[in-house]
Image: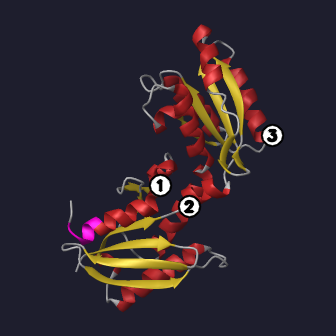
Amino acid sequence: MAVRIGIDVGGTFTDAVILDNDTFELIGTVKVPTTHESEQGVAEGIVKALKKALEEYNISPEDVTFIAHGTTQATNALLEGDVEKVGIVGVGRGVEGYKVKLDTEIGKIELAPNKFLCTKHYFLTQDNNLQKNLNDYIADMISENIGVAVVSAAYSVDDPTSEIEVMDSIAEAGLLGTCSHEISKLYGLRIRTRTAVINASILPKMIQTANMTEKSVIDSNISAPLMIMRCDGGVMSVKEISKRPILTMLSGPAAGVAGALMSEKVS
């Protein structure tokens, strides 16, 4: 019997829900304590929940055709201010470059009372000194313990070449990063940059969480690829998490609505 499994890691309990893959009928649920204090972190609780689900309902790992994880990690990180400092690299030239410089300097973003997302701004003029200046900026980010960067250029939604070239150099230095064109197709540079900064600030934590959860699934001998819930009720791959973790914000409530619609067979 082919089944689908959903996993939710809460502050107190980790839950797994099993559905019939063909009829979407509920087969069963299991609940185990969330293992915050374990050396393996909450991954241990996920493994235990999956093992318990497979054993209690006599399901083999090969029967699992779909497995999804709903996470509040992104939402919690932003509400609690548990985010990384972000280096912003604006890229432009000429008179237009002056506007790019202004629009990409975001400053502090207040996430909650007394909780701030901090940024440091750099600007690259597209001339013969670009690579030298970029190398200096990367060195400064490393010295400032900035582990994640955003690259933002005007009209990159049409031609992302400059953003990609700058980000390639940043990635070669071992820093994580987000190009603004990867996050939004809006022309408004300031809004696009601000959104990319929020995305970048949760990138390291979300990659760690996704990789940890994926390992838990593999350790349970389940070969179906792990999918992560999105804020629109859909799912995304672990690879996509490494680019756009912001799409998981409020995915918990969205998953609840999607589950209710599925349960009532409403499309």
Foreground: disc 1 or disc 3: 1
Label 2 element class? helix
Residue to which mark 3 is pinned: 143
Residue to which mark 2 is pinned: 73
Q: Could you tell me residue 259's position as x and y percent? A: 32, 68
Mark 2 and mark 1 in contact (Cβ < 8 Å)? yes
Q: Which mark is residue 107?
A: none
Classed neighbour count for the residue bearing mark 3: other residues with Cα under 10 Å, few (<14), some (14–19), many (≥20): few
Q: Could you tell me residue 232's position as x and y percent? A: 37, 53
Q: Quadrant of residue 170?
A: top right
Give whichever of 226, 70 is nearer the camera. Answer: 70
Question: In the picture provided, is 141 more to the left or to the right than 55?
Answer: right
- Disc 1 or 3, which lies upstream in sequence? 3
Which three-letter amino acid code belongs to the residue tagged 2?
Answer: Gln
Q: Could you tell me residue 107's position as x and y percent? A: 70, 34
Give whichever of 59, 100 is nearer the camera. Answer: 100
Classed neighbour count for the residue bearing mark 2: other residues with Cα under 10 Å, few (<14), some (14–19), many (≥20): many
Which three-letter amino acid code belongs to the residue tagged 3?
Answer: Ser
The range drawn in magenta is 261-265
Residue lying furthest front: 113
State the CA–CA distance, disc 1 to disc 3: 31 Å
Foreground: disc 2 or disc 3: 2
Q: Quadrant of residue 229?
A: bottom left
Q: Quadrant of residue 44?
A: bottom right
Residue to which mark 1 is pinned: 248
Question: In the picture provided, is 63 more to the left or to the right than 103?
Answer: left
Is 74 drawn above or below residue 37 in the view shown? Answer: above
State the CA–CA distance, disc 1 to disc 2: 8 Å
- Disc 2 or 3, which lies upstream in sequence? 2
Label 3 element class? helix
